[in-house]
Amino acid sequence: MILFETFGLFIVFTLVGVPLVYGLLIATAGMIWWHDLGHPLTSVFLSYIGGVESFVLIAVPLFMLAGEILSRGGVGMRIVTFATKLLGFLPGGLGISTVTSCLIFGGVSGSAIADTAAIGSVMTPAMVRKGYSPAFAGALMSTAGTLAIVMPPSIPMLVYAFVSGASVRDLFLAGVVPAVVFAIGLSIDCVRYGKRTGCDNGETRATGREVWVAFLAAAPALLMPVIILGGIWSGYFTPTEAAAVAAAYGLFVSMVIYRDLKFRDLPALLLKSFTTSAVVMVVIGATSCLAWLITVEQVPVQIADLVTHYATSPWTFLLLVNLAMLTLGCFIEPVPAIILAAPLLVPLATAFKIDPVHLGLIMTCNLAIGLYTPPVGGTLMVGARLAGVGMGAVVRAMIPMMMISVSILLVVTYIPAISMALVHAVR
């Protein structure tokens, strides 16, 4: 089957270090040439252009700009201070504060890498000074940072909405409760670690005034997710307009309220954010080429026949989805993985009467776990670098967290109410 041959070729390219874009394009052109499919290269070019020209995708660089603005300013530090004052008295309190900070900042940035880097640069040294092992600190940052793509505004969810036609508003609402559940699971592991090692039995509880002062300092940043979700949910602006509002509000908060950014900082900040966005868009275009080839060669029909042969119920179908997405997430970043997989899985989910919004949430959670799973894990690399230890040590320390995350993934998968309750409440 051409699908397995194409993915096999692409994975070989990935393992030998070929850049992702070139791997996708070579795999596409290689399959056309190897099987003499007769598709002109013009079709590949047009599918590339068509993959990146959607108006909805304008939101991607704008949300990235908003996240970059707030991560460069003092927003991360203020969120950390608020979380520490609020939860630092618990056993494993510093770890719990780290998870909470990642959850909150994820509601601002929408990017797992930005979340891991912004919060990790503050909390990793603090955890090591407190007595946490560097490996555990790196593991916690690698896992907690991925809350950013489950918590709205999530860039992978935005791309899934573009590919599948699902409602961005519903997807964002569906991510709120699962993100909190994942954060609670990681916090429980922090309590376990703090008690077992004795490195963090909790600090003195902050006074109500100290918590209030920390909250007021972080309030302008905490208001951003409310503005984005509230504006989309109420219909005041579209997801693309919400991204523009987020970027403008981020500039206002960082330059006027906090005054952490100056006008002279803007050129470098804009250059970095749009360079990152350009990389993402180039990957989206290359992934669209491969998705086009898979579609015109009737691979979805073949996949449907294969799945219906083995998956005789929604339960088994969702199990296959989890296995496939966990495997795919080990090798491919969330955005290209969604562009490749969503066109194949959405029609099948519809046949099994599974809500496309629920499917999108499941796919996103799987790919979040893939971000800290070897060999390619993006947040895993960032967390290991921040902690100054090898990836092997971080992975060993991460095993309990990964077990918790996979358990929560299964609960979210088979109890749709966890993700869909908010969605049904506002539909």
Image: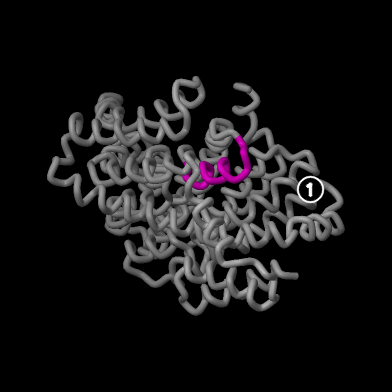
Can residue 288 be seen at all in this image of the molecule?
yes
Instruction: Give the side of residue 177 with respect to residue 259, left or right.
Output: right
- Look at mark 1 in the image and give the residue it sits on: 315
The segment highlighted magenta reads 154-166
Could you tell me which residue is drawn at 66 percent across and 44 percent down? 359
Kindly indicate the quadrant of the structure image that contains residue 212. top left
> Of helix, strand and loop, which mostly describes the magenta segment?
helix
Residue ID at (37%, 45%): 64
Q: Is residue 93 visible?
A: no
Q: Using residue 263 as the reference point, say whether residue 390 is left or right of it.
A: right
Residue 142 spot, x, y in % from top left: 43, 57
Q: Residue at x 38, y 55 (%)?
A: 278
With respect to residue 197, does 178 lie above or below? above
Assign the N terminus to one quadrant of the image: bottom right
Q: Which quadrant is the C terminus positioned in?
A: top right
Q: Secondary structure at mark 1?
A: helix
Q: Is residue 13 magenta?
A: no
Q: Quadrant of residue 24?
A: bottom right
Q: Position of residue 380 (x, y in %)?
A: 44, 62
- Is residue 331 toward the left or the right of residue 299 in the image? left
- Residue 235: image location, x then y, percent: 50, 21
Report which quarter residue 301 is drawn in. bottom right
- Residue 115: give x, y in percent of width and height: 38, 49
Question: In front here: 31 or 325?
Answer: 31
Left or right, residue 364 beside residue 350: left
Label 1 neighbourhood size at 10 Å, few (<14), some (14-19), many (20+)? few
| The one of 281 and 88 positioned closer to us in this rendering | 281
Q: How many marks?
A: 1
Is residue 159 shown in magenta? yes
